[in-house]
Image: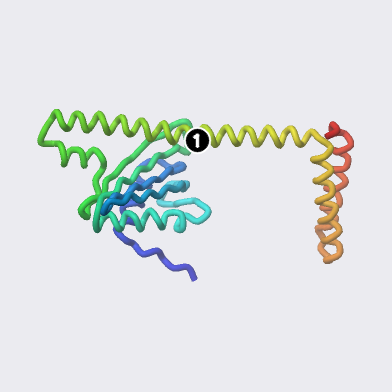
Amino acid sequence: MATTPTATAGRTHLHTAITHDAPGLKFIRVVHFWNGTTTVHRTEVLYAGDGLLLAGDAETQLAPIIQTLDSALRHGVAVLEIVTEHATTPARLTIQRYYLYNGRHYTDAAFDQELCGHDPALLAAAERARHASHAASLRRVQREVDERQAEHERSAARIAREMQTRAFWLRRHREHLARARGSRRAGEHKWHAYALNAAAFARTRAAAIPA
């Protein structure tokens, strides 16, 4: 029987941050500074809206980040950054950044206000630095998105080239022929479908270019 995850303060903060922005792919990064050491964790999860996270195993992926946030609420300081690639407009990226410090959870704007609000010039400088840092993070994630898309296109092009060769269809023919034989020996009805596929692949191979 599945167990319900413990609702720690770190989990609550992370859930609030993830659901604050629009549905889409969330690029999550947390950096924790404590006692002279720096700990960094990052992951990606798909947020579908209405509090629903979609991933291979969202709980496992998010566990190190939640543990880090819980630690930061006890000691040190953590910076939680979430960049969202919007589901409805994939070309659009937005960013949220939070500080966890002294048991509290701030937006980065509120953190700057608390530290520098007494001095308008200092606050203005902090805001300029904040916006520049946001822009740098958005560029970093955009590069990741672009590189992933480029690799997807290269992979699709490789597959398209392979599908024009006899070698590709020969492999497919042999795979399905072997499955048909195995299924028939096992008494499975689907052996006939495998055999039909193998025959179709053989015909396609005859029409393909040599390779």
Instruction: Give the colour scheme of this rendering.
Output: rainbow
Q: Position of residue 34 (x, y in %)?
A: 27, 53
In the orientation shown, which residue stands out farthest toward the left? Answer: 118
Q: Residue at x 25, y 53 (%)?
A: 76
Picture quadrant of residue 20: top left
**Dot 1: element:** helix
Q: Residue at x 23, y 38 (%)?
A: 109
Picture quadrant of residue 208: top right
Left of 42 or right of it: where is 124? left
Q: Residue at x 71, y 37 (%)?
A: 159
Q: Is the residue 198 above or below the residue 113 in the image?
A: below
Mark 1 crowd level (few <14, some 14–19, many ≥20, 10 Å Cα): some
Amino acid type at mark 1: Val
Q: Position of residue 74 (x, y in %)?
A: 24, 58
Judging by the rendered image, the residue that carries numbered circle 1 is: 145
Q: Is the residue 174 above or below the residue 191 in the image?
A: above
Q: Position of residue 142 (x, y in %)?
A: 45, 33
In the orientation shown, which residue stands out farthest toward the front? Answer: 36
Quadrant location of the C terminus in the rendered image: top right
Picture quadrant of residue 72: bottom left
Q: Position of residue 28 (x, y in %)?
A: 40, 45
User: Which of the two residues, 65 or 4, is positioned nearer the viewer here?
Assistant: 65
In the orientation shown, which residue stands out farthest toward the bottom? Answer: 1
Q: Residue at x 47, y 38 (%)?
A: 87
Left of 159 or right of it: where is 99? left
Q: How many marks?
A: 1
Left of 121 or right of it: where is 180? right
Left of 70 or right of it: where is 201? right
